Image (spheres, rainbow, N blue to C red):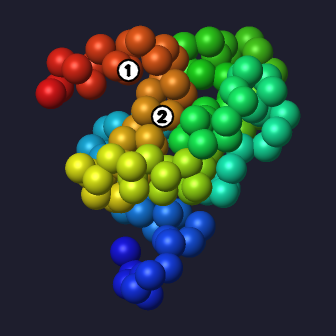
Amino acid sequence: MSEIPSGLAPSLDDLAALAEQAFAALPEGFRAMTGEVIFRVDDFPPDEVLDELGIQDPFELTGLYQGVDLSRRSVFDPQPQASMVFLYRRPILDEWAERGDVTLGDLVAHVLVHEIGHHFGLSDDDIHAIEAAAD
C-alpha cells in the first residue's frame, strides 16, 4: 500500500489497493473460481441496504455481497446481474481502530474473503465455522 500521510485516515483508494492486494494473494484456484465479481469500496452502505437488512447503525456493516451466489445459478436462468462485493471504508476503519489487534490489510482481507464466501453460497454460520476451524 502506498504511504498514507501521518494523521490521515486511509482513503477509498487506499482500501481498494489493500483489497486488490488481498485478492491477488489468494490461491490462484480460489481467484479463478470467484470469476467475474466486481469489487467496490464505499464509505458506507446506502440507507436502502441498511433498511433491507434491518441494520440501524451503518458502522455495523463492513462488507456486503450482492448477486446470485454460485450455488443458486443455473445454465437455464437468464444471465444474472454482475456479482458485487462491497467493502465499507468507515465501518472497517472503525473496527480496525477499536480492535487494535489486527493490521488494516488483514482486516480488509478478512472482510473480502467473507463476502467472497457468500458469492460461493456460504452462509454466515458456514463462514464462521470455517474461520473457527482455521484458528
Picture coordinates of residue 109, whole percent (x, y)? 37, 48
Q: Amino acid at mark 2?
A: Ile
Asked if disc 1 and disc 2 are in contact, CB closer than 8 Å, the reply is no
| Residue ID for mark 2 | 116
The residue shown at (50%, 34%) is 115
Please state if 24 lies on the left or on the right of 65 as rendered: left
Q: Is residue 22 above or below residue 64?
A: below
Please state if 127 lies on the left or on the right of 12 as rendered: left
Picture coordinates of residue 82, whole percent (x, y)? 71, 39
Q: Nearer the viewer, mark 1 or mark 2?
A: 1
Picture coordinates of residue 85, whole percent (x, y)? 59, 42
**Image quarter for residue 59?**
top right
Image quadrant holding the C terminus, namely top left
Q: Does residue 79 appear in this view?
A: no
The residue shown at (64%, 16%) is 73
Picture coordinates of residue 96, whole percent (x, y)? 39, 52
The residue shown at (66%, 57%) is 43
Q: Amino acid at mark 1?
A: Ile
Q: Kindly identify which numbered label has been placed on residue 2.
A: none
| Residue ID for mark 1 | 127
The CA distance from mark 1 to mark 2 is 10 Å
Please state if 27 lies on the left or on the right of 43 as rendered: left
Q: Residue furthest left?
A: 135
10 Å neighbourhood of mark 2: few (<14), some, or many (≥20)? many
Task: State the residue in front, 34 or 98.
Answer: 98
Q: Secondary structure at mark 2?
A: helix
Label 1 or label 2, whichever comes before in sequence order: 2
Q: Does residue 106 appear in this view?
A: yes
10 Å neighbourhood of mark 1: few (<14), some, or many (≥20)? some
